[in-house]
Amino acid sequence: MAELIIPGPQGRIEARYTEPPYEGAPIALILHPHPKAGGTMQDPISIMLYQMFEKHGFGVLRYNSRGVGRSQGQYDQGIGELEDAAYVLDYIENMAESPRYVWCAGYSFGAWITLQLLMRRPEIDGFLAISPPANHYDLSFLAPCPASGLIVSGDSDAVSSPEDVERALTKVRVQKGEEIERTTVKGANHFYQDRRDELIGTCEEYLLRRLAAAEEKLRLEAEGD
């Protein structure tokens, strides 16, 4: 893992990066929780997501959004933070060169930014949205959601309750062939205290299932040629 300083829209962006282990390897971008609530790329769940993708052969990058840590600029109500995410995704794609798959994962506020990023970046193949704060932000912009992914919440989450997420998703449409899966982690609050291993296990199971399905699809297409 290397420390990076990326020249971003509002100045430097502080990041951590693991290079893809081989040419064409998949890549993943990790987005942290709300800056005004102490969210940084050093958040434990953000680090665990990073390590999960790294373990499975991804080039992976996490970073501090504007105004956080050594990243320059100021918090911008999500507008500038989405600009940062798009810029950093460009940066990692340029470094990786022709990645096999592109994934994005975010926790809390980072999940909300992740879901918005999907709508602007058709190259994203999959996503993990952990505890999107559906009681604070409308998710109806996912109309239609262009990629398949997993939305996870804790069943004891007072910030992003499963009921709020389900209510928000009733307004969401999904493009043909794509699917949003939903699951909850039993006994987990918004911070997944004592439930983080279970959370990552749930995300890992989904990631591996998606990767296996994508590889099988490629194999069948190759045999059909």
Image: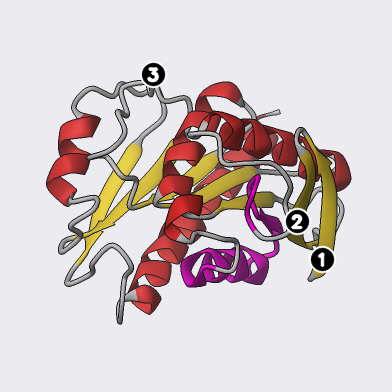
Q: Residues within 10 Å of mark 1 (few under 14, many from 20)?
A: few
Which amino acid type is marked by label 1?
Glu
Q: Residue furthest front?
A: 74
Q: Nearer the viewer, mark 3 or mark 2?
A: 2
> Circle 1 sits on which residue?
3
Q: Secondary structure at mark 1?
A: strand
* Comes first in the chain, label 1 or label 2: 1
Dividing the picture into quadrants, the one containing residue 101 is top right
* Comes first in the chain, label 3 or label 2: 2
Most foreground residue, 82 or 168: 82
Q: Is residue 223 visible?
A: no
Q: Nearer the viewer, mark 3 or mark 1?
A: 1
Is label 1 in contact with label 2 (beta carbons under 8 Å)?
yes
> Circle 2 sits on which residue?
14
For residue 144, the mark is: 3
Quarter of the image for the N terminus: give it.
Answer: bottom right
Residue 220 percent across, percent down from the top left: 59, 39
Q: Residue at left 23%, top 67%? A: 189
Is label 3 in contact with label 2 (beta carbons under 8 Å)?
no
How far, Cα to Cα, is label 1 from label 2? 8 Å
Q: Secondary structure at mark 3?
A: loop
Residue 47 percent across, percent down from the top left: 57, 69
Most foreground residue, 28 or 190: 190
Which amino acid type is marked by label 2?
Glu
Dividing the picture into quadrants, the one containing residue 164 is top left
Q: Residue furthest left?
A: 163
Asked if residue 57 lies left or right of residue 164, the reply is: right
Q: Magenta segment, which residues?
A: 43-68
Residue 10 percent across, percent down from the top left: 75, 36
